[in-house]
Image (spheres, helix red, strand yellow):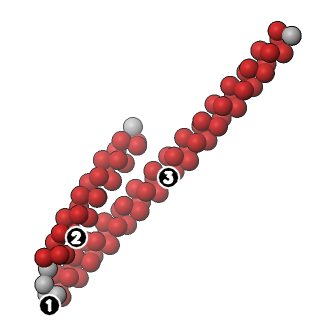
Amino acid sequence: MPGEKAGAAGEALLRRMQRLLARAATLKGRDRRQLLALLDDVETTRRGLLRECAEIEGEMRQATVRATAIGAYLRNSQVQRGNRHN
C-alpha cells in the first residue's frame, strides 16, 4: 500500500531529523563547515518531510472523496429500494 510506504519513509525521515538535531546540540559554534553541512542536511530532511506530509494529505483527501461517494451511493440505493416497495 502506498500509505504504508509513505509512513515508513516518514518515520525514517523523522529519525534522521532527530539524529541531526542531536548532532547539532553537540556541535561547536566555531566549526563553520560542519555547521553549513548540518544546515544543508536539516533542510534536505525538512523538504522530504514536507513532501511526505503533502502525499499523506493527498491520500486523506482521496479517502474523504471516496467515503463521500460511497455514502451518496448508499443513500441513493436506499431511496431506490424504498420507491420500488411503495
The mark found on residue 57 in the picture is 3
Query: CA–CA distance between discs 1 and 2?
Result: 17 Å
Of the 4 image quadrants, the one containing the C terminus is top right
Sooner in the amino-acid sequence: mark 1 or mark 2: 2
Please state if 2 lies on the left or on the right of 80 as rendered: left
Q: Return the disc, 3 or 2, that comes first in the chain's sequence.
A: 2
Q: Helix, strand, or loop for circle 2?
A: helix
State the image coordinates of residue 29 (x, y, percent, origin top left).
16, 87
Q: Say whether residue 42 is left or right of residue 76.
A: left
Residue name at image x 73 percent, y 21 percent = 77
The residue at the point 19 percent across, 64 percent down is 19
Report which quarter residue 35 is drawn in.
Answer: bottom left
Q: Is residue 71 placed above or below 19 in the rendered structure?
A: above
Residue wearing tag 1:
30
Residue 40 higher or lower than 52, as above or below: below
Callout 3–callout 1 Cβ contact below 8 Å = no
- 73 sits to left or right of 38: right
Q: On the rendered image, what quadrant is the N terminus found in?
A: top left
The picture places residue 60, in percent across and down from the top left corner, at 51, 46
**Callout count:** 3
At a point 21% along the width and 69% down the height, the residue shown is 20
- Three-letter code for the amino acid on which mark 1 is drawn: Arg
**Mark 3: which amino acid?**
Glu
